[in-house]
Amino acid sequence: MRDLPQRTRAANNAAPYRISRSSAFWLLSTALALLLFASAAPSPMYPVYQQMWHFSPLVSTGVYAVNTLALLVTLLFAGSLSDHIGRRPVLLAAVLLELAGTLCFAEAQSVTWLFAARAVQGIATGLATGAISATLIDLQPAESRLGALMTNVAAGGGLALGAICSGLLMAYAPAPTTLVYWLLVAAFAVIALGVLLIPETVTPDGHALASLVPKFAVPPQVRAAFLTMAPSIIATWALGGLYLSLGSALMRVQFHLSSPLAGGLVVVALQGASAVTALLARDWTIDQALGRGPVLLVIGVSVAMLGVATHSAAIFFTASVIAGIGFGPSFSGALRMLTGLSPAQSRAEVVTAIYVVCYLALSVPTVIAGLCQSSLGLATTTYGYGAILIALQIIAMLGSLRHRSPHTALAAAECPAPCPGTVAVMPRIAAAHP
């Protein structure tokens, strides 16, 4: 990684630009938003698919989880591939795979198609996330932190827009289960053409095969803090998984809102609030993020459980916004602390270890929730899920008091705001802070 800046500069000097660096930056920000848009688009449709093909809630959460697991495996094995073969080839492959997965959704004839589409989509997102995040850092203006900030905003905004636009099209447009996918096919075709025109920022170095070996570790001096913050990381990402996989079912069963729009709005309440907070709280210190974010998330989850118990959609939506406000700071505070405490030479591996925890938390608990829903019912499953999230967050809050002073001063110096917040920013970004 230490020779990457030199290789990047060499590639920049030699590349025959077809579009400007600024245009490429915003094109890739849009591409990242579209990838997350596509990831959230199926969420309002799960109840409709369930009625069409008569599968269980467990299968529904399994369809959701296969995407996350495919994404995790891809990130582990190919997350740094673009550092070695170039950004454009990886980005083009990712966009074409995403287009193929979107076509599978558009032409889906059974639940098997959904599993295949989500798996391909996960591979595409895994390839693109690391490459886009790294390229945004490469292309951002000098002395700017715009790359990390736009990664957060594009990811959270893309998830929110994907859910709400999919719900709107299902409720008010023709071809409710296919139109959004055909629109995405057209969008990704345009993005693929745009990728061919962006400047290449990396010169291939011949180490592509070696880069496919996953490397992640937690050095001894970070392990105590890592174990302390892990419950908070798990709680934060597991909450996002619950909303994306079972949010529509909650709207229909607990609040008797059968419109697909309601399923999209509940994701918007969480992810939209998270995206806005990423902008407004970009200059928070680590202490501020760890002090405010988890408290807001605990309050939000607690009030959401009250909304479920009273069948009040207004309370639930309000609680989701509160939880969304706490969502980003909770994770970004933990990430900034852990990367700041890590030795520079180990920081990339620490970030990879963090995201292994993140994506397992995003997928495994939702499958367990789907299994419990079949036997315990949705309401009871939601109460138990929420109680576990609150307990994990409180454990982390109490434990973090040991590490927030004086360690946060050191961590803040090594990883100043804004650091990555609500989406996987791969080891290349962590390594950008020497």
Image: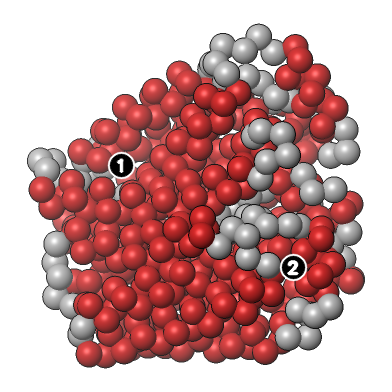
Does residue 125 appear to the left or right of 175 in the view shown? Answer: right
Q: Say which element carries label 1.
A: helix
Q: Position of residue 32 (x, y in %)?
A: 49, 40
Res 222 quadrant in image? bottom right
| CA distance for labels 1 and 2 | 39 Å
Q: Which residue is mark 1?
A: 105
> For this rendering, which residue is in front, 198 or 416?
416
- The residue at the point 68 percent across, 67 percent down is 285
Element on which disc 2 rests: helix
Residue 75 in view: no
How far across and down, in percent of the image, does residue 49 sit?
22, 56
Circle 2: residue type = Met
Q: Confirm or deny contact between disc 1 and disc 2 (CB under 8 A).
A: no
Please name the residue shown 76% across and 15% down the image.
Answer: 13
Name the side, left or right, on which 267 lies relative to 176. Answer: right
Residue 199 seen in the figure: yes
Residue drawn at x 22%, y 77% is 313
* Front in this rendered view, residue 84 or 60: 84
In the rendered image, residue 160, in percent from the top left (x then y), is placed at 36, 54
